[in-house]
Amino acid sequence: MSSWIIQTMEYDVDLEGLLEARLREGGAPYALSSALGGVGVRMEGRQGLLALAEALGRVLIHDLVTFEMAAMADETPLGREDRQRVLENAVAAARRREDLSETVARLCGYLQEEGKLCLEGFLRFRMPETLLFWRLCVEEAFSELLLQKEYGEAASLLRLLLNERPPRCPSLRLCLHGDGLCSLSDEGSLRMEYVDESGEGILSLLIGMAPARLIVYDLSNGARQELVKALTEIFSGRVCLYTGDFP
Protein backbone atom coordinates (compact mmCIF):
# COMPACT_ATOMS: atom_id res chain seq x y z
CA MET A 1 0.00 0.00 0.00
CA SER A 2 1.40 3.40 -1.04
CA SER A 3 0.91 6.65 0.84
CA TRP A 4 0.97 10.35 0.01
CA ILE A 5 0.51 13.66 1.79
CA ILE A 6 -1.86 16.10 0.10
CA GLN A 7 -1.74 19.69 1.30
CA THR A 8 -2.81 23.25 0.57
CA MET A 9 -1.44 26.45 2.03
CA GLU A 10 -3.90 28.82 0.35
CA TYR A 11 -7.33 27.30 -0.18
CA ASP A 12 -9.73 27.65 2.72
CA VAL A 13 -11.35 24.23 2.38
CA ASP A 14 -11.95 21.14 4.48
CA LEU A 15 -9.33 19.23 2.54
CA GLU A 16 -9.87 15.90 4.29
CA GLY A 17 -13.63 16.06 3.79
CA LEU A 18 -13.21 17.10 0.16
CA LEU A 19 -10.77 14.27 -0.57
CA GLU A 20 -12.97 11.74 1.17
CA ALA A 21 -15.99 12.77 -0.89
CA ARG A 22 -14.06 12.51 -4.17
CA LEU A 23 -12.40 9.20 -3.26
CA ARG A 24 -15.74 7.75 -2.24
CA GLU A 25 -17.06 8.57 -5.70
CA GLY A 26 -14.25 6.50 -7.24
CA GLY A 27 -15.13 3.39 -5.27
CA ALA A 28 -11.55 2.18 -4.62
CA PRO A 29 -10.45 1.34 -1.04
CA TYR A 30 -8.65 4.20 0.70
CA ALA A 31 -7.49 5.38 4.10
CA LEU A 32 -7.22 9.00 5.21
CA SER A 33 -5.48 10.43 8.23
CA SER A 34 -4.29 13.77 9.53
CA ALA A 35 -0.69 14.53 8.58
CA LEU A 36 1.70 17.35 9.29
CA GLY A 37 0.64 20.19 7.03
CA GLY A 38 -1.98 18.21 5.16
CA VAL A 39 -3.92 14.97 4.77
CA GLY A 40 -2.35 11.52 4.57
CA VAL A 41 -3.78 9.20 1.90
CA ARG A 42 -3.11 5.47 1.53
CA MET A 43 -4.13 3.57 -1.59
CA GLU A 44 -3.53 0.02 -2.85
CA GLY A 45 -1.72 -0.74 -6.09
CA ARG A 46 -2.07 0.71 -9.56
CA GLN A 47 -5.85 1.01 -9.31
CA GLY A 48 -5.48 2.94 -6.10
CA LEU A 49 -3.01 5.32 -7.73
CA LEU A 50 -5.41 5.93 -10.62
CA ALA A 51 -8.36 6.44 -8.24
CA LEU A 52 -6.36 9.01 -6.24
CA ALA A 53 -5.32 10.82 -9.44
CA GLU A 54 -8.96 10.97 -10.58
CA ALA A 55 -10.10 12.24 -7.18
CA LEU A 56 -7.40 14.92 -7.13
CA GLY A 57 -8.25 15.83 -10.72
CA ARG A 58 -11.84 16.53 -9.70
CA VAL A 59 -10.66 18.59 -6.74
CA LEU A 60 -8.35 20.67 -8.91
CA ILE A 61 -10.58 21.11 -11.96
CA HIS A 62 -14.03 21.26 -10.38
CA ASP A 63 -13.70 22.21 -6.72
CA LEU A 64 -10.86 24.75 -6.72
CA VAL A 65 -11.87 26.62 -9.86
CA THR A 66 -14.05 28.98 -7.79
CA PHE A 67 -11.13 30.02 -5.59
CA GLU A 68 -8.84 30.78 -8.52
CA MET A 69 -11.52 32.56 -10.54
CA ALA A 70 -12.60 34.63 -7.54
CA ALA A 71 -9.07 36.03 -7.33
CA MET A 72 -9.16 36.77 -11.07
CA ALA A 73 -12.58 38.45 -10.83
CA ASP A 74 -11.28 40.60 -7.97
CA GLU A 75 -8.77 42.10 -10.41
CA THR A 76 -11.59 43.62 -12.48
CA PRO A 77 -12.73 47.21 -11.77
CA LEU A 78 -16.22 46.12 -10.76
CA GLY A 79 -18.34 46.39 -7.67
CA ARG A 80 -18.99 43.43 -5.42
CA GLU A 81 -22.27 42.34 -7.01
CA ASP A 82 -20.92 42.59 -10.54
CA ARG A 83 -17.78 40.64 -9.61
CA GLN A 84 -20.04 37.91 -8.22
CA ARG A 85 -21.97 37.80 -11.51
CA VAL A 86 -18.73 37.54 -13.47
CA LEU A 87 -17.52 34.76 -11.18
CA GLU A 88 -20.72 32.74 -11.47
CA ASN A 89 -20.82 33.01 -15.26
CA ALA A 90 -17.12 32.22 -15.64
CA VAL A 91 -17.30 29.16 -13.37
CA ALA A 92 -20.36 27.88 -15.23
CA ALA A 93 -18.56 28.30 -18.58
CA ALA A 94 -15.46 26.50 -17.32
CA ARG A 95 -17.43 23.60 -15.88
CA ARG A 96 -19.32 23.11 -19.14
CA ARG A 97 -15.98 22.35 -20.78
CA GLU A 98 -14.31 20.30 -18.04
CA ASP A 99 -11.87 17.64 -19.23
CA LEU A 100 -10.10 15.56 -16.60
CA SER A 101 -8.13 13.26 -18.90
CA GLU A 102 -4.93 15.31 -19.28
CA THR A 103 -4.88 16.35 -15.62
CA VAL A 104 -5.36 12.76 -14.40
CA ALA A 105 -2.50 11.57 -16.61
CA ARG A 106 -0.20 14.26 -15.21
CA LEU A 107 -1.21 13.44 -11.65
CA CYS A 108 -0.52 9.74 -12.18
CA GLY A 109 2.98 10.51 -13.41
CA TYR A 110 3.60 12.89 -10.52
CA LEU A 111 2.27 10.58 -7.79
CA GLN A 112 4.43 7.73 -9.05
CA GLU A 113 7.54 9.84 -8.36
CA GLU A 114 6.54 12.03 -5.41
CA GLY A 115 5.01 11.35 -2.00
CA LYS A 116 3.76 14.88 -1.33
CA LEU A 117 1.51 17.11 -3.44
CA CYS A 118 0.65 20.76 -2.84
CA LEU A 119 -2.56 21.51 -4.72
CA GLU A 120 -1.88 25.15 -5.62
CA GLY A 121 1.71 24.34 -6.55
CA PHE A 122 0.66 21.56 -8.92
CA LEU A 123 -2.02 23.77 -10.43
CA ARG A 124 0.30 26.70 -11.10
CA PHE A 125 3.42 24.85 -12.22
CA ARG A 126 1.97 21.74 -13.88
CA MET A 127 -1.35 23.11 -15.25
CA PRO A 128 -0.62 26.61 -16.64
CA GLU A 129 -2.93 26.08 -19.63
CA THR A 130 -5.83 25.39 -17.25
CA LEU A 131 -5.20 28.66 -15.42
CA LEU A 132 -5.04 30.45 -18.78
CA PHE A 133 -8.34 28.88 -19.82
CA TRP A 134 -9.94 29.96 -16.54
CA ARG A 135 -8.65 33.51 -17.03
CA LEU A 136 -10.13 33.59 -20.52
CA CYS A 137 -13.48 32.49 -19.06
CA VAL A 138 -13.33 35.35 -16.55
CA GLU A 139 -12.37 37.87 -19.24
CA GLU A 140 -15.21 36.66 -21.46
CA ALA A 141 -17.71 36.95 -18.60
CA PHE A 142 -16.35 40.42 -17.80
CA SER A 143 -16.73 41.55 -21.44
CA GLU A 144 -20.27 40.19 -21.63
CA LEU A 145 -21.24 42.07 -18.47
CA LEU A 146 -19.88 45.34 -19.86
CA LEU A 147 -21.78 44.81 -23.10
CA GLN A 148 -24.97 44.13 -21.16
CA LYS A 149 -24.50 47.31 -19.15
CA GLU A 150 -23.87 49.37 -22.28
CA TYR A 151 -26.83 47.73 -24.00
CA GLY A 152 -29.06 48.44 -21.00
CA GLU A 153 -28.07 52.11 -21.01
CA ALA A 154 -28.75 52.38 -24.76
CA ALA A 155 -32.14 50.69 -24.36
CA SER A 156 -33.07 53.14 -21.60
CA LEU A 157 -32.20 56.12 -23.79
CA LEU A 158 -34.19 54.74 -26.73
CA ARG A 159 -37.17 54.10 -24.46
CA LEU A 160 -37.06 57.69 -23.21
CA LEU A 161 -36.83 58.94 -26.80
CA LEU A 162 -39.79 56.80 -27.83
CA ASN A 163 -41.92 57.91 -24.88
CA GLU A 164 -41.39 61.56 -25.80
CA ARG A 165 -42.89 61.00 -29.25
CA PRO A 166 -46.64 60.74 -29.87
CA PRO A 167 -47.68 57.39 -31.42
CA ARG A 168 -47.61 57.51 -35.22
CA CYS A 169 -49.72 54.40 -35.75
CA PRO A 170 -52.17 52.53 -33.50
CA SER A 171 -50.84 48.99 -33.81
CA LEU A 172 -48.14 46.91 -35.50
CA ARG A 173 -47.61 43.15 -35.67
CA LEU A 174 -44.10 41.73 -35.96
CA CYS A 175 -43.26 38.07 -36.66
CA LEU A 176 -39.66 36.98 -36.07
CA HIS A 177 -38.27 33.84 -37.69
CA GLY A 178 -35.10 31.94 -36.92
CA ASP A 179 -33.55 32.57 -40.35
CA GLY A 180 -33.59 36.35 -39.82
CA LEU A 181 -36.86 36.96 -41.68
CA CYS A 182 -39.03 39.71 -40.19
CA SER A 183 -42.70 40.13 -41.15
CA LEU A 184 -44.30 43.45 -40.26
CA SER A 185 -47.95 44.38 -40.73
CA ASP A 186 -50.56 46.78 -39.41
CA GLU A 187 -54.34 46.74 -39.27
CA GLY A 188 -54.57 48.17 -42.78
CA SER A 189 -52.58 47.70 -45.97
CA LEU A 190 -49.02 47.66 -44.58
CA ARG A 191 -47.25 44.33 -45.03
CA MET A 192 -43.47 44.01 -45.18
CA GLU A 193 -41.09 41.07 -45.22
CA TYR A 194 -37.30 41.30 -45.23
CA VAL A 195 -34.22 39.68 -43.71
CA ASP A 196 -32.53 41.51 -40.83
CA GLU A 197 -30.18 39.17 -39.00
CA SER A 198 -28.74 41.84 -36.69
CA GLY A 199 -32.12 43.33 -35.76
CA GLU A 200 -30.81 46.89 -36.00
CA GLY A 201 -32.90 47.67 -39.07
CA ILE A 202 -36.21 46.54 -37.59
CA LEU A 203 -35.47 48.39 -34.33
CA SER A 204 -34.80 51.65 -36.19
CA LEU A 205 -37.94 51.19 -38.27
CA LEU A 206 -40.16 50.50 -35.27
CA ILE A 207 -38.78 53.40 -33.25
CA GLY A 208 -39.45 55.67 -36.22
CA MET A 209 -43.01 54.36 -36.64
CA ALA A 210 -43.62 54.62 -32.85
CA PRO A 211 -46.68 52.34 -32.62
CA ALA A 212 -49.04 52.78 -29.71
CA ARG A 213 -49.16 48.98 -29.44
CA LEU A 214 -46.62 46.44 -30.68
CA ILE A 215 -47.51 42.76 -30.94
CA VAL A 216 -44.49 40.48 -31.34
CA TYR A 217 -44.72 36.83 -32.39
CA ASP A 218 -41.39 35.14 -31.72
CA LEU A 219 -41.27 32.07 -33.98
CA SER A 220 -37.46 31.81 -33.87
CA ASN A 221 -37.19 29.14 -31.16
CA GLY A 222 -34.79 31.36 -29.20
CA ALA A 223 -32.63 32.42 -32.17
CA ARG A 224 -33.79 36.08 -31.92
CA GLN A 225 -33.50 36.28 -28.13
CA GLU A 226 -31.41 39.47 -28.12
CA LEU A 227 -33.80 41.26 -30.48
CA VAL A 228 -36.83 40.17 -28.43
CA LYS A 229 -35.12 41.46 -25.29
CA ALA A 230 -34.45 44.80 -26.97
CA LEU A 231 -38.04 45.11 -28.15
CA THR A 232 -39.51 44.36 -24.72
CA GLU A 233 -37.18 46.87 -23.03
CA ILE A 234 -37.51 49.70 -25.53
CA PHE A 235 -41.28 49.29 -26.06
CA SER A 236 -41.98 48.58 -22.41
CA GLY A 237 -45.62 49.27 -21.57
CA ARG A 238 -46.82 48.99 -25.15
CA VAL A 239 -45.51 45.58 -26.28
CA CYS A 240 -47.30 42.23 -26.20
CA LEU A 241 -45.08 39.17 -26.74
CA TYR A 242 -46.09 35.68 -27.91
CA THR A 243 -43.65 32.81 -28.25
CA GLY A 244 -44.03 29.32 -29.68
CA ASP A 245 -45.70 27.87 -32.76
CA PHE A 246 -48.73 29.49 -34.32
CA PRO A 247 -50.93 28.30 -37.15
Image (spheres, helix red, strand yellow):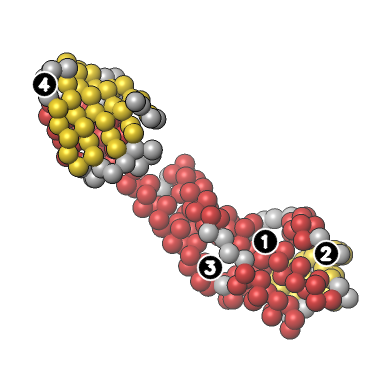
Q: In this orientation, does residue 10 appear?
A: no
Distance from Cα at disc 1 to Cα at disc 4 = 64 Å
Distance from Cα at disc 1 to Cα at disc 2 = 17 Å
Q: In this orientation, does residue 219 appear?
A: yes
Which element type, helix, strand or loop, lies under badge 3? helix
Q: Nearer the viewer, mark 2 or mark 3?
A: 2
Residue farthest to the bottom? 113
Pick whichever of labels 4 and 2 is earlier in the sequence: 2
Query: Residue beneath label 2, please?
Result: 28
Q: Nearer the viewer, mark 3 or mark 4?
A: 4
Say whether marks 2 and 3 touch (CB < 8 Å).
no
**Where 109 falls versus 103 (above or below)?**
below
Q: Position of residue 92 (x, y in %)?
A: 52, 51
- Mark number for residue 59? 1
Residue type pointed to by label 1: Val
Q: Position of residue 18 (x, y in %)?
A: 74, 56
Decide: few, some or many residues near mark 1? Use Cα within 10 Å; few <14, some 14-19, many ≥20.
some
Number of dots carrying numbers: 4
Q: In this view of the protein, which residue sits in the foreground, 96 or 193?
A: 193
Residue type pointed to by label 3: Thr
Pick whichever of labels 1 and 4 is earlier in the sequence: 1
Q: Is residue 211 left or right of residue 139?
A: left
Pick whichever of labels 2 and 3 is earlier in the sequence: 2
Q: Quadrant of residue 100?
A: bottom right
